[in-house]
Amino acid sequence: MTGGRGIAHLVCGRRAKWLVLGLWVVVLLVVAPLAQKLTDAQDNDAQSWLPGSAESTQVLEISEDFRPEQIPAVVVYARDGGLTAEDRARIAEDVRELKQLRDHGIRGAETRGPVYDRETDPRAAQVFVPITMDEQGWERISPAVESIRDDVGESTGGLAVHITGPGGTSADFAEAFEGIDSTLLFAAMTVVVVMLLITYRSPTLLLVPLLSVIVALFTAQALVYLLAEHGGLTVNGQSAGILLVLVFGAGTDYALLLVARYREELRRHQDRHEAMALALHRAGPAVIASSATVVLSMLVLMAAEMNSTSGLGPVAAIGVAVALLAMLTLFPALLVIFGRWIFWPVIPHHGDPDPTERGVWARTGRRIARRPRMVWAVTAGVLAICSLGLIQLRAEGISNADAFTGKPDSIVGQEVSARYFPAGSGDPLVIVANQPQAEEVGRAVAATPGVVPESLGPAPGSKTVHEGRVLFEATMSDPADSEAAKQTVERVRDAVHEVPGADALVGGGTAALLDMDEATTHDNILIIPLVLVVVLLILCVLLRALIAPLLLIGTVILSFAAALGISALAFRYLFDYAGESTDFPLFVFVFLVALGIDYNIFLTTRIREEAARQGTRAGVVTGLAATGAVITSAGLVLAGTFAALGTLPMVAFAEIGFAVALGVLLDTFIVRSVLVTSLFLDVGEKVWWPHRLAFSARPDPGTPGAQSHPARPAFEDEARPGPKRGSGGGGPQGRDG
């Protein structure tokens, strides 16, 4: 006890608080400029997402020896009644102008076309404009497409003009990611401000956690930037967006828990420094354990095959670790510096009664204690029924056409192009083979169902031969992002792999999607069990028990299944989404288990603390009463920050945000408050097995001799009648409630 409080005083002592503030001011001055550079350090090209060992990744690397990495923007012209002479003249003039383009990586001189849908009376035409995708490709893809659009103009007079293909689609994705940080920051800040106002009922108090979270965010972004620039860490728009959400959500959660405990101690101690030291000593282990759960769970993602998933692991871990550091140092120092007035207008005074003693959560705990077995059985049954919605889950990938919440021009152009041309045009298969066997490989490709035979040929703008290898392309008859096209890739790979000595590889956009799906399936099977093992071990160490952690893991899995089941139904029948990305279950699982277990940690550590004093059954009700309000507030904040992902115009983000927000709410209001509480009440002391608490005889709170006020709050370990020990004002150290 003394040692823990001594360490806490290093943060919030009378002089130490100013030193902590000064150190963080210096940190902020250093990291703020670096944090602004994180967007420039993002790597959103294909290789940052693809699995490193995949066949499509190998083709992408080999193809750079033949030509600079490039993707075509496809300009589509169409008129249902047939192109007029004026239309064809306009197209020819556009091609001449496109050939002059050089800015933003556009390789105008290599423009191909126009290609008409038929020789006589054509109804549509395609023009292919290659765009270089080097290290700056992602940043300039949108300006490049805008330059093309400036040349070709808009649809007029019945002639439809659209820019599609990989270039057009990539530009729309880039625009969706553009401003992601500012959009999410504004949305997350709005959620946090509103929830803190509701929770604290203090316009002044909300500024302290908000300021601390923003400092933590800048620090985390700066560290991630430095690792991306000098440590080889892969950061893309997805991981940068989730970093922001995690820092805001986790940081605010830790602040809420600490403030709740600080309020308790302010009612018992005159000296705010002593009150904060005790609050840190009591709440610190739960906050640290919670953070460790998230950090280690995120680091497990590094074992993933997908580059985007493995890169997210350290990014998210850094964010949560920095949030923990800020909330255990800067945040308490600021609270102590400002003093009690920061709680205005509801200022806690020494000697005030504890409002949790007769609050809604105390009454809820007493009601559950009457028939706990029936309560947990019914609750578990309802969650199991909700999980049946999993049969509606279609986490098989999302096509480009279904990836946006709206319908950008590239998707409209894709639909128009598919009416007149082979649906896979503009995003061909890319085949690499040894030169002596190239002709045989070409015949195998052309003979494969799903490939347009006459499309087989050298890749435009590439070398014919490089170090004994050749590269050529082929168009598929199905849309490049369709399931049918993926099956074509599998058939082509089977065919070319059988050519002796060819060492043939098949890549391209569709092949990359196929490889990503396979890698994600592997990651799901590997990562999910590893995360469960990590969380179980942390719970065992924290609670020094086995039964309680196993029960908690079971409730989290049930909560995850229910959240996924409800989400799947909502996506089908409420939002009308076409499906889910293949990594959707993995991300939702990791975030829900790592973050959802937080609330169980907050509750069960308090229950264990109380069980040592008054027995498990009474301790359960006391723990629920003491933590109910703060955990509810924390859950609402975290759910709101993840729901902010829905402000982005991409289905994958919206789905992750909805499912995680729903799962957090289930954990907050159902799993933690009802299911875990009733299970612990039903199992009783045995929940702590094999710890000695499992064998300590305590009176049942409902039997004569038991404590009549189960919502008694926790105070000092030495709480008992007698004078208060140590400094901090008069009055008893503890009371019966």
Image: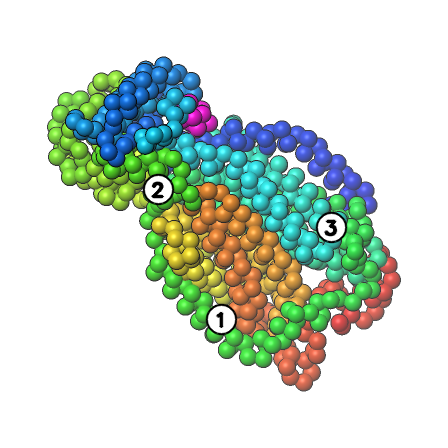
Q: Are marks 2 and 1 in contact (CB under 8 Å)?
A: no
Q: Is residue 135 magenta?
A: yes
In the picture, measured across the screen, residue 422 lies left or right of residue 556, that is: left
User: Label 3: few (<14), some or many (≥20) within 10 Å?
Assistant: some
Q: Nearer the viewer, mark 2 or mark 1?
A: 2
| Residue at 66% in and 30% down | 30
Judge by depth and name the residue closer to the eye, 421 or 246.
Answer: 421
Residue 21, label in figure: none
Label 1 – label 3 distance at C-alpha: 37 Å
Image quarter for residue 697? Answer: bottom right
Give the labeled residue for mark 2: 401
Q: What residue type is labelled 1?
A: Thr
Q: Where is residue 313 in the image (x, y as percent from the top left)?
A: 48, 42
**Residue 675 seen:** yes
Q: Which amino acid does label 3 sit on?
A: Pro
In this view, 55 is above or below 352: above
The residues colored magenta run: 134-148
Residue 379, label in figure: 1
**Residue 516 seen:** no
Q: Is residue 29 magenta?
A: no
